[in-house]
Image: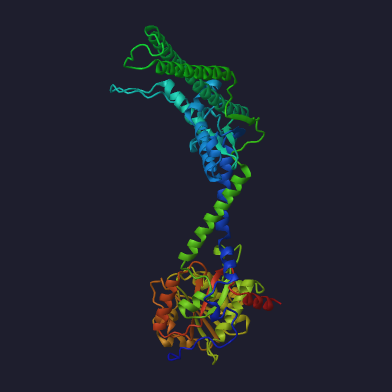
Amino acid sequence: MLERNQFGPADVQRFYPTERDRDFIKFADIKLFLRRYAPFIGSFAAAGAALGLFYIVTSDPIYTARTQILIEPKIPQLLQQQASEINLSLDTSQVETQLAVLRSEKIANMVIDELELIDHPKFTSQEGASFSERIDKLLVLLGLSDGLATSSPKPDVPTTGDGSLSLDPEYEARQQAVWDFGDSLSVARAGVSYAIDIWFQARDPELAAEIANATAEAFVREQLEIRTAAASEGLRWLEARIEEVRAQMNQATKDAQEFRARHDFSIGEGEQESGPTLEELEVTADTYRKMYESLLEAFTSSVNQQPYLIADARVISAATRPLHQSHPRKMLTLAFSVVAGLMLGFGLAIARQLTDRSLRNSRQIRDELGLEPVGELPVVHFRRGGFGRFLEAQRRPRSTFARSLREAARTIAMSDPSGSVRLVGIISARPTDGKSTIASNLAALDAQFGKRTLLVDADAQKAVLTRSFSRATEAQAEARGFAFLPSTSEQVEALLGGKAEALADLAEYESVIVDLPPLTSDISFREAAGLLDAVVLVAEWGKTPVEMLSELVAELRTAKVSMPGVIMTKVRSLSSLRYRRRLMWWAR
């Protein structure tokens, strides 16, 4: 019995994926992944929804008012006849210039002064509240706080004691108002038209509409003031120029008259003098007179047109009181929070899947251990640890757990074509993988099949079977249908020492199930395993590292032990649809 060939499982029908399916991700793998990590991903989605609700509840509603103005760019007459690309470039430049004016501090100061926003109680910054302020607000909403701690006084103006200049309170207040105004103001061109949209955000809807309209009016007023100032400056220049030309005209006329008075211009008489002639002096005087008349005409025209100066912009749509808040957008925020939570949870789930080296499917058993999957035992709900009792298959023979274990028992029995698998060891890499439960239930199944069965507790360090079955009465021992050998017996000690005579007294039993020490035990299992016909590995699904199983397999192969395969315990999803259908057929 000590010398045996290293036979593997018999060439029987398997209910697992074939070799050609191993290198591809199938729909079943995706379904298994989603089923495994659904609670994990769902928790992140729930956390995202909670954060979104927290943000919505603790954020002050903000209202956005909109007004629209129309500008009329002035293109020189000469350039109007040029290519359309030039005109478009001029249009874009002029519109962008108007947008810059709307965003300027000059417009902001005009509106602030007009509406007295510096001291306005409802004109505040649109920056979000701090986390502590949001917590305080949430406590107020829940009735757990009176809200007194949420109102913090404005900080005092900082002063210095080293002689340096301190900040001017009025200047600081105005600058803060200008910054808040700029943060709340948005301007943009409406498409490629000459219309400009002006949006303003405020926590009060009426104030938002009032400031939006005031901004548009300030812009129009600023345009008119600029044109008026330009016209006034032009009039002042014309006045100075008219006075200068009038003096030059009078002097030229006087010079011509004096020249005529000094000379008699009879034909052929008089002596010619050097210098300007009378004709030249008269031409000069006439030129200055024409210049004076032209300037005087321009001045008169400018004075007449000044009362009719109009701005290059006008309001075409005044802002009204917004009916609904624009921020926070509740449904969008909530949907974004949930989606962000799902994406984060899904990403972390993929990372966990890629770094997870625990045993989870039959593919790992074949590819990394070189063994075959013998069985997959599902989670038994409402049981301690999520696994079955020592006699679960006997107490609930029609359960999924019992059906799966019966299929595993048949596979183990068929692993040797000669049918000589009588001494079967059950071993695991960790003591919590469920090997003792598997051993006791396999013994119970063999007893139900009518075999004379012996269950041996060779795990002397843990000895859970000994503590459980040694206290059983004679009636209970007869009811379970199999004999039990505790870990304290001399036969177990001899078996662990690798003595073949330890099995001599067990010839009367048709089936002997041995619960071997785990890989992490201080007791060696190699000598005892070498005396058995076959050793079945037990691994907990999603918990047992593949590296530990590989080490255990290497130890058993060194001891020249036959290994039919691996039984996975606490499986939350069977790896093959055909395998599940097979179990359903057995349940009929």
- Who is closer to the viewer here, 430 or 37? 37
The quadrant in which residue 585 appears is: bottom right
Q: Please state the horizontal and vertical placement of residue 389, each as a whole percent of the image.
A: 58, 69
Q: Please state the horizontal and vertical placement of residue 280, each as a whole percent of the image.
A: 40, 18
Residue positioned 42% across, 22% down in the render: 171
The quadrant in which residue 440 appears is: bottom right
Q: Is residue 273 left or right of residue 29?
A: left
Residue positioned 58% across, 31% down in the render: 203
Instruction: Identify whether 328 is placed above or below 257.
Output: below
Instruction: Identify whether 444 is placed above or below 297.
Output: below
Residue 479 visible in rendering? no
Instruction: Identify whether 158 is placed above or below 449.
Output: above
- Who is closer to the viewer here, 52 or 317? 317
Residue positioned 43% across, 75% down in the render: 550
Residue 407 visible in rendering? yes
Q: Please state the horizontal and vertical placement of residue 470, each as a whole percent of the image.
A: 52, 72
Is the N terminus in the top left, top right, bottom left or bottom right quadrant?
bottom left
Q: Is residue 356 left or right of residue 65?
A: left
